[in-house]
Amino acid sequence: MTPFDSRKLRNAFGTFVTGVTVVTAYDQGGAPLGFTANSFTSVSLDPPLALVCLANSSRNYNALINASGFAINILSETQIETSNTFARPVEDRFASVGWHDGPNGSPILDDVCGWFDCSMHKMVEAGDHVILIGRVEAFDSTATPGLGYARGAYVTASTATLALAHSANLIVSALIEKDGHILLVDDGNGGLTLPERVVQDEGASTAVKNLIASTGLHAQPGFVYSVFEDADRKRQHISFLCENAGGTPGKGAFFPLTESVLAKVSDPTLLTMLKRFAAETVLGHYGIYYGIYYGDHKSGEVRPVA
């Protein structure tokens, strides 16, 4: 098997670890099956392993424990109905969704923000559940925001943004990443900062898309990475994590987050956020589902979200 890019795989695991997933496979008769789950997590990078938990009482139990493999589909924030469909006792759950076979043969749902196509590696009995450990044979991910579930309700990056967008004097910034480097621009005082834009009547989502377009890059806004208040300017600030898909920046450049580069970032809150991003990139765990920076431009803390 061709070795994976371990950094890309680690980031894919870290981005989606608490999202809503649909686990899919084929039964022994060749019919596709699937169920909604939120127990997906990474196990190992070498070899690349991931796990899901299946209730012993599940109607899919016998089919899954006898399957040669399965796929983990990480739903995008627009796929709430897909999540509901695969959570209900529907006779043909695949009738209302688009899907295709993955490289390893398991069903892959269309329009998900990421997927892992796995061969069956091991099964572990665990109380009233069985843990299915799969070896990742193929995977893909995008910058599309994922769907979360907490305290009986769905959680999306858009809902967090819309809640904040009602406040006046809102600023959005773009944390655009490329191969571990971040796009930084001149702050006007000889230092470095993120590209940012004051939100006008267009709303936060449109503002961040316009901001990205102004950089000359082909990137998509991902999830909300950080939220803080700028007391000096009396403004609310939302930073979106974005994945660069190509192009050359019209201003600024991509910088590694080394000590010498961070020393040129004069804004204390931005500096704290970039240090956090540098540390989380190494670990492969970052995102709105882990925590958001709350505070002002001088001090704050990273609080876990649900």
Image: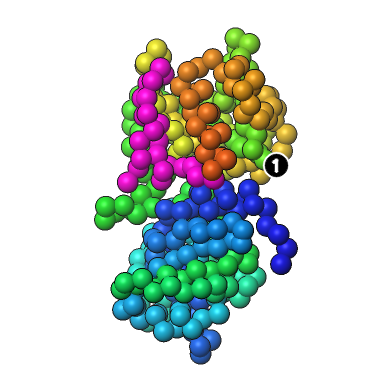
Q: Mark 1 points at which residue?
A: 246
Q: Is mark 1 on a helix, strand or loop?
A: strand
- Please indicate whether residue 186 sits to the left or right of residue 72 in the image: right
Quadrant location, the N terminus: bottom right
- Please indicate whether residue 291 sits to the left or right of residue 282 in the image: left
The residue closer to the viewer here, 145 or 210, is 145
Q: Quadrant of residue 248?
A: top right
| Residue segment shown in magenta | 284-306
Determine the main secondary structure of the stretch shown in magenta. Answer: loop
x and y percentages locating residue 241 in the rendered image: 52, 38
Residue, far top: 189
x and y percentages locating residue 191 in the rendered image: 61, 14
- Please indicate whether residue 220 sits to the left or right of residue 24 in the image: right
The residue closer to the viewer here, 151 or 282, is 282
The residue closer to the viewer here, 281 or 231, is 281
Q: Can residue 132 be seen in this view?
A: yes
In the rendered image, residue 304 lying in the magenta stretch gets the answer yes
The residue under the point 51% across, 62% down is 50
x and y percentages locating residue 36 in the rendered image: 39, 67
Q: In which quarter of the image is residue 120?
A: bottom right
x and y percentages locating residue 170 in the rendered image: 41, 25
